[in-house]
Image (tube, grey):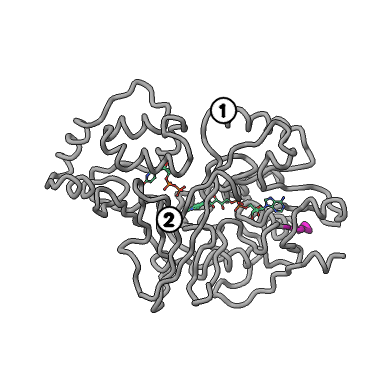
Amino acid sequence: MFDYLIVGAGFAGSVLAERLANDSDKKVLICDKRPHIAGNAYDFYNDEGILIHKYGPHIFHTNSKDVFDYLSEFTEWRTYEHRVLASVDGMLVPMPINLDTINKLYGLNLTAFEVEDFLASLAEPCDQIKTSEDVVVSKVGRELYEKFFRNYTRKQWGLDPSELDASVTSRVPTRTTRDDRYFTDSYQAMPKHGYTRMFEKMLDHPNIKIMLNCDYQEISEEIPYRQLIYTGPIDAFFNYRYGKLPYRSLEFKHETHDTEQFQSAPVVNYPNEQAFTRITEFKYLTGQEHKKTSIVYEFPRAEGDPYYPVPRKENANLYAKYKTLADARSDVRFVGRLATYRYYNMDQIVAQALTEYGKMVGKKRQEAAVAKAAVGNSNGSNTSVQILTNARLS
Ligand code: FAD
Ligand code: UDP
């Protein structure tokens, strides 16, 4: 008898499995329909021996000390500050828009003070910022909005920025300084031996059993468990009773090139002419040295694996109906990006899972995060993670 069946071995499911096993001595079965752990953060060495992220670039950044400390139990880190260039008007310029972006784009030589006035002269004031268009146009005006945001957003979401909540483009700031980092969080780092290795450490506990290639519906009748934790899409859990919740998908096109460096930045965004949104070159992220290099293109799709909840009013209303169903299920906990329909980064999902665990044991998140037992070292040695297969179960 398992105390918990956890559906999904991404950050939400794996953090809860680790806490329940390590801190509460519960017996946990975690299943995932994919053939691997780590959810969307899964990374692996490809045929050429280059460490790549199967589901697109995953860069860790957080302002939460407790989240960073918690994950540090399972990995060492490589300090990494992410940088992005955007391909606009035939030039590669820093994104987020900063002083250098403006100077390069317009052939100017403005100072930080002058660029503030320059942007203020372009900005179109807006009484109430409601949409993703308002956010940008009210800060930098329509021309820059059209060059950097409108088409990228239409491609990425299949919607105009005016149809999306302000929260979407608010993720990308505008700067009047020369700071060209994509994020400014206090902690910015990549797991030294990759995400998958970090997850292996998290799940390496005798009380945790893992089943891969396994949809929970195939086993939930057969396996005895007391409580369910579900981290998949919430609409699927309720058999789409109120209709499908929109999740945006992506198609990833991975390539390896016989050259040491493919592009001049870790990520280059292509807002306008191309069908893809961005190209990532993994060696920048991982620090790996290799005579070849691997990249990934991201092509947005309406159909396919659910990756992004789509933040807009009508979707929030539909989610609220599913949430009412979820709240009535005291036997199931819904956690994670897909189950709570939140456009959350990895650190926010870790925080959400730790908060959920805190609720289960009557502790605050910060206390709930403190690892009780010393876990295996994080130096990249082999682990003894126990992965079951469907066959072994029968
Ligand atoms: P997931 O990782 O999606 O895990 C859910 C798991 O549940 C999946 O593995 C799925 O297979 C499994 N599952 C679903 N249904 C079932 C079922 N019926 N039976 C069994 N298993 C099931 N965040 C950052 O902080 N930095 C970044 O740079 C970043 N980049 C990103 C880039 C892309 C392209 C994407 C899509 C996301 C990015 N994110 C990034 C967000 C990050 O991926 C998520 O915050 C995080 O992975 C969410 O973890 P999760 O456990 O909620 O969900
Ligand atoms: N965005 C844009 N142009 C860019 C970068 C971002 O229009 O060059 C918009 C787009 O709508 C995108 C959102 O800002 O979906 C958030 O960008 P972020 O880089 O955070 O997206 P993610 O990494 O989550 O895909």
For the N terminus, give its image quadrant. Answer: bottom right
Residue 29 counted in the magenta span: yes
Q: As rendered, which of 139 and 303 lies closer to the eye?
A: 303
CA gap, disc 2 and disc 1: 35 Å
Q: Residue at x 58, y 42 (%)?
A: 247
> How busy is the neighbourhood of tag 1: few (under 14 within 10 Å), some, or many (20 plus)?
few
Q: Is residue 208 left or right of residue 84?
A: right
Disc with the residue nearer the chain's start (2 vs 1)? 2
Q: Residue furthest top?
A: 127
Q: Position of residue 327 (x, y in %)?
A: 72, 33
Q: Is residue 66 left or right of residue 387?
A: left
Q: As rendered, which of 120 and 206 lies closer to the eye?
A: 120
Q: Position of residue 191 (x, y in %)?
A: 50, 65
Q: Residue at x 60, y 39 (%)?
A: 341
Q: What residue is pinned by disc 1? A: 314
Q: Residue at x 42, y 52 (%)?
A: 276
The vertical placement of 366 against 196, above or below, is above
The vertical placement of 284 against 87, above or below, is below
Q: What residue is pinned by disc 2? A: 187
Identify the magenta region. 25-31
Give the quadrant of residue 383.
bottom right
Residue 180 counted in the magenta span: no
